[in-house]
Image: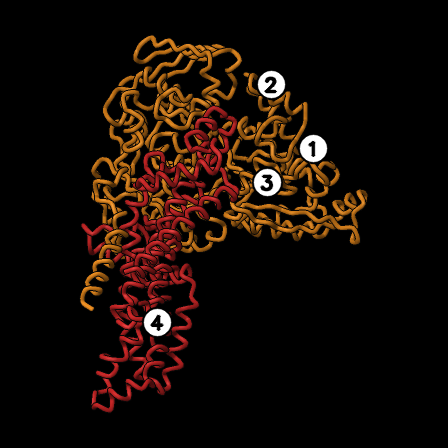
């Protein structure tokens, strides 16, 4: 029996070794680049270190993110989570002032616009994180990169492909350049398009950017441990206002319940909270909560292409039947903002607040409209309401909506689907009757509202309105601010009058900082801005 | 020898069938990795979409895509990740595997160390009034969902007692203290169900063995109660439990998907969830294939271990 035993043992050892062949050596670990310039403190569960931490300016602010980064190369990973983090390491010719909702010059000293001719002058003495001077050649490179003209950069932008078609670059010096765009390409939203372009050094290859990104932002890359965290440190030669917080760590912690516990335990210093978590976080000693409209829109789209929602009366009835105040009070702790169209108050002067109560909650009025259209207790309308399964707030909203609609002869079947399926079938395929969607906003009002154009791929409800399309085209070329605002108002009014969808609310953004930190600025787009955070007095 | 060769062939066939099922599944399930990569506000970029379709082989028919994939696998190339631009599937799995295996092995060790002595002790307490309590405790251990258990442990050991960290848990043996402190809660969450399961199976198995004739013979020879148990009964009672261990190992490995996500641990499980979120088919397929290989390998190892415990197994199999 010895031989079989030896054979068996040998086989067992071989199997174990085989299973472990997938284990890589430390040399195989790609992605970690530079050595950490910061000594990472071991995670401590002890609260009495807090007094020491306030004085320890080397201690990084720790911020959780729900998912890993597909790429560190600026703008290559299109996910909002990645952009929110990597914006800290990058800069553009413009920056966005969240207080005034205006664009301001950042890397650019001046940008003169003469129809389709842009004369750009850079500030003097600016450098990238690697010490190289920022020049106009880098600006041209960065624009071309986003237009897909740089080898190795994997995600081009359609907007910049069109903008640079026929564009002529005239580099007059290291600090001055003139770009002549083709006349058709130039629009009034160019400023926002330029805001989206991170200026990167032309001498750093894309392969390097993926591992150790180099930018011009107030923070520079230190290290990345895939699946675990990315660390940054303050860029001491930043051209603008230097941040107060020296070191930062974005740690990957997908589960929101875990994030909440970690925040309570002082292991993380920042947390984005839902209204359900608001009470818990408010009770944490010295935690400070910052709240503002998110520039997001929670909307219930009705498919105007098919029955019954090709009937304007039915769409109106649905708008009147939904109690938005109840949704806001129940699900957002009154922190949400009621909407009447697809703009949020975060868009400042562009938001038409008069549309909020066009369809006041009126069950009897809605019922009367449904009766006029042949519906009754004996002849109820059955309809499926799709939601994104991963989105808890949408699931909760759906229940309240179902209840509201039950009073106007409508039986709603709620069908949650995963985002992948939703995107494929409902968003792209337009195969739905009713669908709830959380639409993330942009600072550029055109990008927010143009989705309702007749030919727009994002036109979920299927609005077909010639006037809207004309306004959508004209607003791009209207240089007068007042007229432009008026055009956006008219576009919002069309959406409301047509009752294309039920625009429910901007649920708002609530962010809490731990007791060591203060002054968080909420942006109307994905950006966790470290540079404005200060130490608490 | 023929027995083992047959087992090996069945193993390979199983993995092959799993590869087909996994591949076909992702052709049927909705989800568009190209659009996930392009982004919802860049969806008019037809040039980029076409380029990515070619890069991801999405322009080819499914059968051809499968052949490309499986021939790559046979050469050790699991393909490029759709989601992660800088890594191949093999690299991603390789960097995360040590973490997941550490959790799995630590869990199995804990299960063995706790459940085997505890089972023996429970057997010796048969007839006492505490048996009902033990039974209830193991029942609870089996019923508790891992996700809930993980959160409970975080609350108890993290926020109330403040003994253990909740976040930034890493498996890095250059920092052993930090690593051990970090993995205690995840390992507990993974193990509790397995401990309960083994205790129930092993105590039952021991109780089935105890009335057998050979035990009477051994007792009649004057062997002490303790030696009857440890030298004769336990080994025989362990044979059916070995299969359970195999199932537990696999459930620990797959259960780590939830646990890694809750604790934010960079293992295979959290990688799988990330891949599913962005429809990263090559990565999902690679991970599922790896899990299937581990599963069949574990069953094969258990089959190899049976004869060590009970040599009669070789004779039965001829």
Mark 4 touching mark 3, by CB under 8 A?
no
Q: CA distance from mark 3 to mark 1?
A: 16 Å
State whether residue B252 is above or below residue A431: below
Q: CA distance from mark 2 to mark 3?
A: 26 Å
Q: Quadrant of residue A518?
A: top left
Q: Residue at x 35, y 18 (%)?
A: A141
The local secondary structure at tag 3 comes to strand
Q: Colour of chain A?
A: orange
State which chain disc 2 sits on: A
As drawn, the label of residue A474 is: 2
Q: Which residue corresponds to mark 4?
A: B240
The local secondary structure at tag 4 comes to helix
Q: CA distance from mark 4 to mark 1?
A: 71 Å
Q: Which residue corresponds to mark 3?
A: A299
Q: Quadrant of residue A357?
A: top right
From the viewer's perspective, tell me whether residue B19 is left or right of residue B315: right
The numbered mark, 3 or 1, whose residue comes first in the sequence reads 3
- Local packing at callout 2 (Cα closer than 10 Å; few below 14, some 14-19, many 20+) is some
Q: How many marks?
A: 4
**Residue A466 image point, x, y percent:** 68, 23
**Residue B107 image point, x, y percent:** 30, 62
| Labels 2 and 4 within one chain | no
**Residue B211 image point, x, y percent:** 34, 86
Q: Residue at x 21, y 61 (%)?
A: A7
Q: Which residue corresponds to mark 1?
A: A497
- As drawn, the chain in red is B
State whether residue B189 is above or below residue A531: below
Residue B177 in view of the camera:
yes
Q: CA distance from mark 4 to mark 3?
A: 57 Å
| Labels 1 and 2 within one chain | yes
Q: CA distance from mark 2 to mark 4?
A: 77 Å
């Amino acid at each position: 029996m010895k031989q079989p035993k030896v054979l068996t043992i040998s086989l067992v050892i071989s199997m174990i070794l085989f299973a472990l062949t997938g284990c890589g050596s430390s040399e195989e670990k790609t992605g970690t680049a530079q050595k950490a310039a910061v000594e990472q403190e071991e995670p401590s569960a002890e609260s009495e270190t807090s007094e020491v931490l306030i004085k320890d300016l080397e201690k990084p602010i720790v911020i959780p993110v729900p998912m890993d980064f597909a790429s560190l190369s600026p703008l290559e990973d299109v996910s909002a989570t990645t952009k929110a983090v990597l914006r800290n390491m990058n800069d553009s010719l413009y920056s966005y002032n969240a207080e005034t909702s205006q664009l301001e010059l950042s890397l650019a000293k001046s940008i003169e616009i003469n129809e389709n001719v842009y004369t750009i002058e850079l500030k003097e003495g600016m450098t990238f994180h690697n010490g190289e001077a920022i020049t106009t050649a880098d600006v041209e490179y960065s624009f071309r990169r986003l237009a897909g003209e740089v080898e190795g950069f994997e995600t081009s932008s359609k907007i910049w492909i069109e903008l640079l078609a026929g564009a002529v670059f005239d580099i007059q010096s290291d600090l001055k350049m003139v770009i002549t765009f083709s006349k058709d390409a130039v629009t009034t939203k160019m400023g926002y398009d330029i805001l989206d372009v991170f200026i990167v050094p032309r001498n750093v290859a894309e392969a390097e950017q993926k591992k150790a990104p180099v930018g011009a932002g107030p923070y520079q890359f230190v290290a990345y441990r895939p699946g675990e965290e990315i660390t940054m440190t303050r860029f001491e030669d930043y051209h603008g206002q230097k941040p107060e917080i020296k070191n930062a760590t974005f740690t990957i912690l997908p589960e929101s319940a875990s994030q909440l516990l970690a925040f309570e335990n002082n292991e993380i210093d920042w947390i984005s909270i839902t209204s359900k978590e608001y009470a818990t976080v408010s009770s944490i000693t010295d935690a400070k909560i910052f709240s503002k409209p998110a520039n997001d829109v929670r909307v219930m789209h009705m498919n105007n292409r098919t029955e019954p929602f090709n009937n304007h009366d039915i769409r109106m009835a649905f708008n009147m039947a939904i109690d938005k105040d109840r949704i806001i009070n129940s699900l957002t702790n009154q922190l949400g903002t009621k909407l009447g169209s697809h703009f949020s108050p975060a868009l400042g002067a562009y938001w038409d607040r008069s549309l909020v109560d066009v369809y006041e909650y009126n069950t009897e009025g809605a019922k009367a409209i449904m009766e006029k259209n042949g519906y009754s207790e004996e002849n109820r309308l059955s309809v499926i309401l799709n939601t994104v399964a991963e989105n808890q707030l949408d699931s909760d909203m759906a229940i309240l909506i179902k209840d509201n609609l039950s009073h106007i002869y409508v039986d709603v079947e709620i069908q949650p689907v995963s985002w992948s399926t939703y995107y494929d079938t409902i968003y792209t395929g337009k195969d739905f009757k009713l669908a709830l969607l959380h639409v993330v906003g942009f600072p550029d009002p055109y990008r927010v509202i143009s989705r309702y154009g007749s030919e727009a791929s994002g036109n979920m409800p299927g609005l077909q309105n010639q006037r809207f399309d004309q306004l959508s085209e004209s607003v791009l070329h209207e240089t007068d601010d007042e007229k432009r605002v008026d055009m956006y108002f008219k576009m919002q009014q069309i959406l409301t009058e047509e009752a294309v969808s039920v625009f429910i609310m901007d649920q708002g953004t609530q962010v809490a900082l731990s007791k060591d930190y203060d002054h968080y600025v909420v942006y109307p787009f994905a950006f966790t801005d470290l540079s404005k955070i200060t130490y608490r007095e | 020898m023929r027995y083992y060769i047959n087992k090996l062939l069945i193993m390979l066939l199983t993995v092959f069938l799993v590869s087909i099922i996994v591949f076909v599944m992702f052709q049927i399930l909705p989800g568009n990795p190209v659009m996930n990569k392009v982004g919802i506000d860049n969806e008019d970029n037809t040039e980029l979409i076409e380029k990515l379709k070619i890069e991801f082989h999405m322009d080819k028919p499914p059968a051809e895509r499968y052949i490309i994939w499986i021939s790559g696998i046979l050469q050790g190339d699991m393909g490029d990740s759709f989601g992660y631009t800088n890594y191949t599937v093999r690299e991603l799995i390789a960097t995360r595997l040590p973490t997941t295996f550490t959790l799995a092995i630590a869990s199995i060790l804990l299960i063995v160390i706790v459940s085997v002595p505890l089972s023996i002790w429970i057997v010796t307490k048969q007839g006492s009034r505490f048996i009902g309590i033990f039974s209830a405790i193991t029942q609870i251990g089996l019923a508790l969902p891992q996700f809930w258990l993980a959160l409970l442990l975080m609350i108890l050991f993290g926020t109330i007692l403040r003994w253990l960290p909740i976040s930034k848990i890493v498996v890095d043996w250059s920092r052993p203290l930090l690593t051990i402190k970090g993995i205690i809660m995840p390992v507990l969450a993974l193990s509790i169900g397995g401990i309960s399961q083994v205790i129930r199976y092993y105590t039952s198995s021991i109780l089935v063995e105890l009335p057998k004739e050979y035990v009477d013979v051994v007792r009649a020879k004057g062997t002490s109660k303790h030696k009857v148990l440890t030298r004769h009964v336990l080994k025989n009672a362990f044979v059916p439990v070995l299969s359970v261990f195999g199932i537990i190992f696999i459930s620990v490995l797959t259960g780590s998907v939830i646990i890694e996500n809750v604790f934010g641990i960079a293992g295979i499980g959290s990688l799988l969830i990330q891949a599913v979120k962005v429809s990263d088919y090559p990565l999902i397929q690679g991970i599922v294939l790896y899990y299937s290989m581990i599963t069949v390998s574990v069953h094969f190892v258990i089959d190899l271990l049976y004869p060590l415990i009970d040599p009669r197994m070789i004779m039965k199999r001829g």
